[in-house]
Image (cartoon, coloured by chain):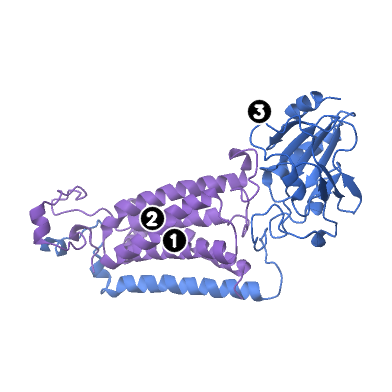
Amino acid sequence: MSRTQAAPRFEIPDPKASGSGRGPLLIVGAVISLIVVAAVIAFAVTSGGDSSSDGVEAGAASPAGDLAASSGASLGVQDPQVAGVALPLFETVQGDPAVGKQAPVATGTDFDGNPIELHNTGKPTAIVFLAHWCPHCQREVKDLGTWLSDGALPPDVELLSVATGIDPNRPNYPPDEWLERENWAPPVLVDTTGAVAEAYGLSAFPYWVFLNADGTVAARATGEMSTDVLEQVLAGLQR
Amino acid sequence: MINADSMSLFFSLLAALADLGIVVGVLMLLAPRLPEGIGRPLLELRALVAPASIWLAWLVAAVATFGSLYFSEAAHFLPCKMCWFQRIGMYPLALILGIAAFRRDLGVRVYAVPLAVLGSIVSSYHYLIEWFPQFESGSCDPTVPCTLIWFRRLGFMTLPYMALTGFVSIVVLLALPGRPRDDSGQESSSRPIPTGENLNDDPVPGPDPEHQLTR
């Protein structure tokens, strides 16, 4: 067993040659000093002024994973009201128990305070639920924007949107600035409390609910939807 | 003032430091194949750092664990599913590398390197889907999708990036001491299983001397 002290174990210069047993200690000490320097720099930079320092895209904390952690006050709009029976939580497209059920009616406002009602038009309706911090919603809004500006939405179909999952501590807040930046044309119901999303059984973002002209659910879906599929679904809604 | 803003900058600086360390560490590992003028000082540096490598690897794991707990418990950034898999890789390292450093037991590499390699694979994937969310799925979990980016410092420093840096720097650090060899030059990784007699001789086995770092 004593042979371990004899031969160098590594194909590198003998560590003992580079000084006493203090070598490792010095290295660890140097690294710890660097960590302290980094801490000093970080706190000095961020405490100098209240500026959100350069390069940061997102903010601080989110207390919980609620659908909406914010109050409506921060966006200056009223909380929405929901009437009717809530739809079950969405799980799969195949055999969705919500199909054929009457969708609840939600009333609220858009970002400017104008009243918005989900599905009262007597027309087939597509409702898309969007969260400002969700990268898939951000892509969906971009794709749909192009599709809409090409005039591809059938004239006898209503497209409504719901801004939900609103959280001032998450990226890309506030949602109204995001949608304005994307030139989002459809009406937006501001779901300040998350109650509308819950009543429609939202389980992921983005979330689609398709209604027939009589207000019954024709289909529900989660995730980015290609405009090809969207056109097929819209064509199949009962007029 | 300690807040999520200052802490994210602090850990970004540490990650940048560790990135630099990874580059130097990889150069140290390649040193024998480099020209004499560069290779020689790198080998000398490696000889200096190698005896401290387990302590340094432990330091990385401990700081990463602390950062992870700070961001979830103090800053309330909710850990997503993939964050949890990376935690499963990192948290045990903070413990076993500490014990191994104390015992000067290089044999810990057999246990630590797989954890760190698996962790770095998860981190890489997590970092990839932050840039390309479509690789994961078409939708966001309503509470905490893995594509949700809590902060992105300096344009690229996100939490999975830091985790990746932590895992890779641990692997590089643990590689620095090189392969332990016995006198005949054979790798000593396959040792005979001790018999009961041997155990009686040595009731409290210390760290494998073949794997011990030079004091």
Mark 2 residue crowding within 10 angstroms, few (<14) / some (14–19) / many (20+)? many
The mark closer to the camera, 2 or 3, is: 3
The C terminus of chain B - image quarter: bottom left
The mark closer to the camera, 3 or 1, is: 3
Q: Is residue B148 left or right of residue A231?
A: left
Q: Which mark is on residue B172?
A: 2
User: Quick one: SS at disc 3?
Assistant: loop
Mark 1 residue crowding within 10 angstroms, few (<14) / some (14–19) / many (20+)? some
Circles 2 and 3 on the same chain? no
Residue B39 in the image: state x and y as whole percent.
34, 57
Q: Is residue B75 left or right of residue A130?
A: left
Q: What residue is disc 1 on?
A: B21
Q: Which mark is on residue A95?
A: 3
Q: Is residue B28 left or right of residue A177?
A: left
Q: Label 2 to label 3, Cα distance in Å? A: 52 Å
Q: Label 2 to label 1, Cα distance in Å? A: 9 Å
Chain A's colour is: blue
Residue drawn where x is 26% and y is 66% of the image: B103
Q: Which chain is purple?
A: B
User: Quick one: SS at disc 1?
Assistant: helix
Residue A45 in the image: state x and y as whole percent.
63, 73
